[in-house]
Amino acid sequence: MTDAFAINPSVFKAYNLKHGVVIRLPKHWQIIESQLMDQIDTNTEIYTGVGQGNNDILMAANFYDGRTKAPTASARVSVRVKQTASQSDIAAMSQADLEAEANQAYQATLAAMMKSGDKITRITPYKILKDNLSGYI
């Protein structure tokens, strides 16, 4: 039997992360260094006022299309070390529930940024999708 990727190589690269999580990202995406991922947690806590000490960012990556200096797309995989919701709770959530959570988080972040006095150049609305990743929802 031959390896399918030996015959038809993929444009994706697989990453084996902690907690048994495996993710495949396009090879041309830029992986964010761990020090910068720590800063993402710090900024999130500053802007939202929600402690991030139980958040473990496993990987973050950006795609740059060359038209702007800012990333065109981003991906982030993180886990909460302490459980914040059970798998059954998440499974029971509808898309409307997810959208309400995303909107609430977006509004909290926007309010915190405005309160901080920082110049806001752009904030992208949050979108939450439910999917399975390495056996977790």
Image (cartoon, rainbow, N blue to C red):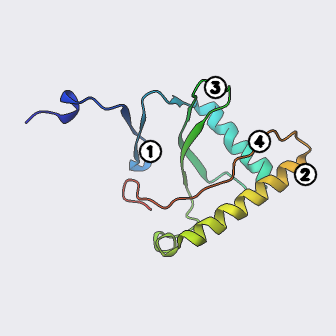
Q: Residues within 10 Å of mark 4 (few under 14, many from 20)?
A: few
The N terminus sits in image quarter: top left
Residue at image position (43%, 34%) is 26
Q: Left or right: 11 with respect to 91?
A: left
Indicate the secondary structure of the residue bearing disc 4. loop
Residue 109: percent from the left, percent from the top?
77, 54
Residue position for label 2: 115
Residue 21: percent from the left, percent from the top?
41, 48
Q: Amino acid at mark 4?
A: Arg
The C terminus sits in image quarter: bottom left
Q: Earlier in the sequence, mark 3 or mark 4?
A: 3
Front residue of 50 and 82: 50
Badge number at residue 122: 4
Indicate the secondary structure of the residue bearing disc 1. helix
Front residue of 83 and 64: 64
Residue position for label 3: 67
Residue 88: percent from the left, percent from the top?
46, 74
Q: Left or right: 64 with respect to 132?
A: right
Between marks 3 and 4, how big is the CA–CA gap? 16 Å
Indicate the secondary structure of the residue bearing disc 2. helix
Q: Amino acid at mark 3?
A: Arg
Residue position for label 1: 18
Residue at image position (65%, 38%) is 38
Q: Amino acid at mark 2?
A: Lys
Between marks 3 and 1, how big is the CA–CA gap? 34 Å
Q: Earlier in the sequence, mark 3 or mark 1?
A: 1
The answer to whether the residue labelled 4 contacts the one labelled 1, judged by CB atoms less than 8 Å apart, is no
Q: Left or right: 4 with respect to 94?
A: left
Q: Residues within 10 Å of mark 2 (few under 14, many from 20)?
A: few
